[in-house]
């Protein structure tokens, strides 16, 4: 799996090509989006998204795969609710869960 942060859902072709750098996130970015690209997912696999900020978990979401996919891209995140994102370190964690067991995880980080 590969993963990253963006301020919007990235273009699938860019993710697939491995060229997704996205705009530089700022404290004024409208959203924090955590994306993942992976291979060989099965129906009912779960992708667990979590974004942690300087004050703890700010977002968590589970996405269940509706069918088997040789390649896939998913994204999840949240819009900014205050004037600026809090200053500090942010961590994105995506876990691949199959039959209740964590098979793989990817962690990405950045700091404002």
Image: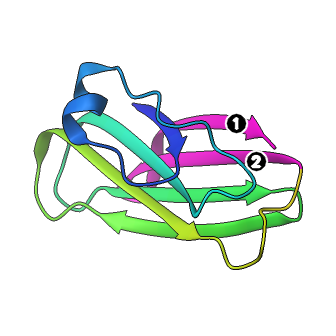
Which quarter of the figure has residue 100? bottom left
- Which residue is denoted by mark 2 in the rendering? 90
Number of marks drawn? 2
Residue drawn at point x = 78 percent, y = 65 percent: 84
Residue lying at 22% horizontally and 40% vertically, measured from the top left? 12
Decide which of tag 2 and tag 1 comes sooner along the chain.
Answer: 2
Task: Report if residue 106 lies within the magenta region.
Answer: yes
Residue at 40% from the left image edge and 42% from the top image edge: 36
Q: Residue at x 77, y 62 (%)?
A: 85
* Dot 2 crowding, Cα within 10 Å, few <14, some 14–19, many 20+: many
Q: Which of the image's four quarters has the N terminus?
A: top left
The correct choice, above or below, for 19 with respect to 29 in the image is above
Asked if the residues shown at circle 2 and circle 1 are in contact, with their CB atoms under 8 angstroms apart, the answer is yes
Q: Is residue 37 left or right of residue 101?
A: left
Badge 1 is on which residue? 109
Q: Quadrant of residue 54?
A: bottom right
Q: Is residue 4 above or below residue 80?
A: above
Quadrant occupied by the C terminus: top right
Give the secondary structure at mark 2.
strand
Q: Label 2 vs label 1: CA separation?
A: 6 Å
State the image coordinates of residue 49 (x, y, percent, origin top left).
Answer: 52, 57
Residues in magenta, as a range: 88-112
SS for tag 1? strand
Identify which residue, 28 or 42, lies in the foreground: 28
Q: Main secondary structure of the magenta part?
A: strand
Q: Position of residue 8 (x, y in %)?
A: 43, 54
Left or right of 49, for residue 57: right
Q: Is residue 31 magenta?
A: no
Query: Is residue 109 toward the left or the right of residue 24 in the image?
Result: right
Q: Where residue 6 appears, x then y in whole percent?
A: 51, 45
Q: Is residue 59 above or below residue 6?
A: below
How many neighbours does mark 1 have within 10 angstroms: few (below 14), some (14-19), or many (20 or more)? some
């Amino acid at each position: 799996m590969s993963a990253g942060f963006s301020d919007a859902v990235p273009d699938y072709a860019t993710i697939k090509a491995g060229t997704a750098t996205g705009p530089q996130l700022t404290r004024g970015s409208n959203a924090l989006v955590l994306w993942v690209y992976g291979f060989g997912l099965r129906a009912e696999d779960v992708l667990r998204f979590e974004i942690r900020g300087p004050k703890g978990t700010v977002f968590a979401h589970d996405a269940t795969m509706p069918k088997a996919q040789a390649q896939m891209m998913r994204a999840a995140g949240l819009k900014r609710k205050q004037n600026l994102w809090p200053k500090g370190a942010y961590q994105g964690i995506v876990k691949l869960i199959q039959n209740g067991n964590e098979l793989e995880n990817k962690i990405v980080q950045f700091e404002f």
